[in-house]
Structure formats: C-alpha cells, structure tokens
Image: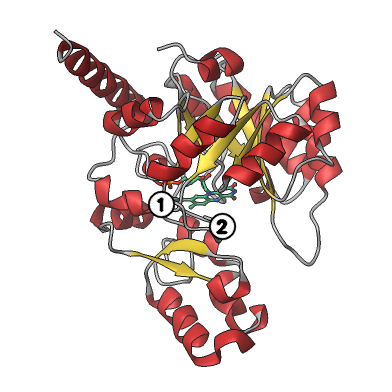
C-alpha cells in the first residue's frame, strides 16, 4: 500500500511503532522495520547520547530498512542532554525523528539541516497546526484512547482525525486505539495516511520486555486502563494495578493540593521494574484502551502482514458494495 507516509519515510506499509520508554530498544525497532513498517528507538530510555549512538548502531546491525528515533520533551526537573541526543541521531544516519511532548521548534532546524523528516505527535488540532506552522513534515494525531499522555482535551479519534483532515495540509497518521486492519482502513477513511501503534506492538514476540507485560496486555480489557496525574495537568493513561490504585487514592485524598512529590514513588523509576523485571504492581506504566482488542502475541511480521491483509479484504469488500 502506498500513501504519502510510506513515500515520505521510504517504508512498505503505512504502520509506525511509536516511541515507548523501555520498549523502544533496538530489537523492537528492527523487528518493526524488518516487517515493512517504521520502527522507532526511544532516545530517553538511553542514559546518555553515547548510549543512544550505540543503540542506533545495534539497530542498524539488525536491519537495513529505515528506522526512526523518538525524542520526547516532557516536563522534567533536570532536562536531558537534548543537543547531545540530536548529535547522535544525526551522526547515526537516522532519517526520521518522532518528536513528542513540548513544541520541538528549538531542535527542528538541526534535524531539517541534516535532511531528517520530523513527525510530531500531538493530541489536538491546534497543536497539529502549530507543528505544521513551524515546519514539521507530518504529525501523528494521538486520540484520547491512546496509551501515555492524551493531553487534557479528551477528544477521541472518531472526531479528532476528521477534524485534523479538515484543517491540516501536511500528512498525518492516526495514533491511539489502532490494532488491526479495521483500524487502518478506518484511519484512512478519516483522512490519515497510516497508523501509529504503541500498546499493540508490546504484545509481540520480539518486544524486548518481560513476558508478564505481554500477558498483562492480552489479559486486559478496554475497561482496565486508568487516567493518572490529571490534577497535575500531566494526564497519563496507564494499566490499572496496585501502584496505580495508590496514585488514584492519593489524588482523591489530596484533591487540588496534590504535588508531584506525593505520588513520586509510584510514577518515577517504574519502567525498568515493569518492563525488565516484570513487577506488574510497581506503579504507573502507559497502556491504551486498545488492550481490549489485543488477544495474542504474534511476531511483528505476522502482525503487520495480518493488518495489511485484513485491510485489503475490507477495502475490496467495501468497493464491491458499489457494484
Ligand atoms: C509502554 C509505553 C511507553 C510509551 N512511552 C512513550 C514515550 O516515551 N514517548 C512518547 O512520545 N510516547 C510514548 N508512548 C506512546 C506511544 O508512542 C503511542 O503514541 C501510543 O502508545 C499510541 O496509543 P496506543 O497504545 O493505543 O497504540 C508510550 C506508550 C506505551 C504503551
């Protein structure tokens, strides 16, 4: 299938694996890219720019297909060494960067000068328009269904995608709640040029995470995610567990008086415990409503092939309706 996104990124299928903390390692990105999608390494999971350079090199040893790197700008006390990470990305010969969180205008000139395509992930039409105006090549439109940070507007993709199509001139992909061929065809119908998936790619054979995490996603239904940190205006959609229930109890108890320090233990340093050690009650980790649509743990190749063949079947069936 050829869309503006497959052409822009030089990939076979319009399927992207979004940046994921402690999941987007070289193995994950290489498996998705080898399957014909765009695999993305998550920069900030690497402790230093030198580690990121090493991770990019490892990934390139596993695939000769295009890969991307995610650079997330979230509110933090000690800002990471962004210039250093950008240097590693450029010197590593990466051709696509997914930015997320704050406006990436500071880093954009360096990436553009190096010929890198930038896709900015955003959760509202106004942020997508801003990304377009500062020169991003594409956007990933992340609906309220998504794992991670859905923003504070709470607009699901059935509204957000057509609204984006009505306003944007640059291409966009649909992110949040995407799982199968139905998702892809629906996204295309609403004006997207492809899909971005997070949670679905964790439940794959190659995802470099503890088996407990994959099993938890398969076991979860669409009723099992929670929104934490809403009172701090840093909302995150996570899988419910004992740590998350502690956070929610604190939020209820302290109301507007809550500070980050009050929930620190259950939201900071959680990812290595969950993803590497399989401690499922360690605290808050991102998971989407799409967990309700995930029932197996295929290889990335099987998953991507299945999405593409389902999409083809649906498109042919719909075309046949016209007689
Ligand atoms: C475990 C996990 C960690 C994530 N970490 C990041 C991250 O570090 N940076 C980022 O931009 N997005 C992150 N995301 C969001 C994904 O890139 C993607 O936007 C989201 O998962 C899409 O929603 P879906 O899970 O319904 O497919 C994460 C998602 C998951 C599931």
Q: Are marks 1 and 2 in contact (CB under 8 Å)?
A: no
Instruction: Name which quarter of the figure residue 116 lies in.
Output: top right
Horizontally, is 101 left or right of 123 in the view? right
Helix, strand or loop at label 2? It is loop
Residue in the picture at 42% in, 21% down: 35
Q: Is mark 1 within 8 Å of ligand 1?
A: yes
For the N terminus, the image quarter is top left
Q: Which residue is mark 1?
A: 145
Camera-nearest residue between 59 and 307: 307
Camera-nearest residue between 220 and 64: 220
Q: Tell me the tag on residue 184.
A: none
Above or below, comparing residue 87 to residue 311 in the picture? below
Give how far across and how far down residue 88 sits, in percent.
Answer: 79, 34
Q: Is residue 197 visible?
A: no
Helix, strand or loop at label 1? It is loop
Rounded to the nearest angstrom, the CA distance separating label 1 from label 2 is 11 Å
Residue in the picture at 75% in, 26% down: 92
Residue in the picture at 49% in, 56% down: 276
Horizontally, is 289 left or right of 129 in the view? left
Instruction: Name which quarter of the figure residue 110 lies in.
Output: top right
Dot 1 or dot 2, earlier in sequence: 1
Above or below, comparing residue 198 to residue 237 in the picture? above
Above or below, comparing residue 86 to residue 269 in the picture? above
Q: Is mark 2 within 8 Å of ligand 1?
A: no
Camera-nearest residue between 106 and 43: 106
Q: Residue furthest bottom?
A: 253
Give how far across and how far down residue 270 sits, in percent.
Answer: 54, 66
Above or below, comparing residue 257 to residue 41 in the picture? below
Q: Is residue 16 visible?
A: yes
Q: Which residue is mark 2?
A: 151
Q: Residues within 10 Å of mark 1 (few under 14, many from 20)?
A: many
């Amino acid at each position: 299938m050829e869309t503006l996104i497959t052409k822009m990124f030089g990939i076979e299928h319009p399927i992207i694996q979004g940046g994921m903390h402690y999941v987007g390692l070289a193995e994950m990105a290489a498996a998705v890219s080898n399957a014909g999608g765009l695999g993305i390494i998550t920069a900030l999971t690497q402790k230093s720019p030198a580690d990121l350079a090493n991770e990019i090199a490892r990934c390139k040893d596993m695939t000769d297909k295009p890969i991307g790197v995610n650079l997330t700008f979230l509110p933090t006390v000690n800002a990471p060494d962004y210039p250093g990470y950008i240097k590693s990305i450029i010197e590593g010969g990466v051709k696509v960067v997914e930015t997320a969180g704050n406006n990436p205008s500071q880093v954009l000139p360096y990436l553009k000068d190096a010929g890198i395509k930038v896709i900015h992930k955003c959760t509202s039409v106004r942020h997508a328009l801003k990304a377009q105006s500062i020169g991003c090549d594409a956007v990933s439109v992340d609906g309220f269904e998504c794992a991670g940070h859905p923003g504070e507007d709470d607009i699901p993709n059935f509204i957000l995608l057509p609204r984006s199509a009505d306003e944007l001139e640059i291409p966009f992909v649909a992110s949040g709640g995407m799982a199968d061929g139905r998702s892809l065809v629906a996204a295309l119908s609403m004006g997207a040029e492809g899909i971005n998936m997070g949670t679905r790619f964790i439940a794959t054979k190659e995802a470099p995470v503890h088996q407990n995490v994959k099993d938890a996603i398969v076991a979860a239904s669409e009723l099992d995610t929670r929104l934490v940190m809403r009172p701090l205006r840093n909302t995150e959609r996570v899988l419910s567990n004992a740590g998350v229930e502690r956070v929610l109890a604190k939020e209820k108890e302290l109301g507007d008086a809550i500070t980050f320090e009050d929930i620190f233990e259950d939201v900071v340093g959680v990812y290595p415990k969950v993803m590497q050690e399989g401690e499922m009650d360690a605290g808050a980790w991102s998971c989407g409503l799409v967990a309700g649509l995930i029932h197996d743990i295929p290889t990335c190749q099987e998953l991507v092939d299945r999405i593409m063949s389902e999409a083809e079947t649906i498109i042919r069936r719909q075309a046949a309706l016209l007689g």
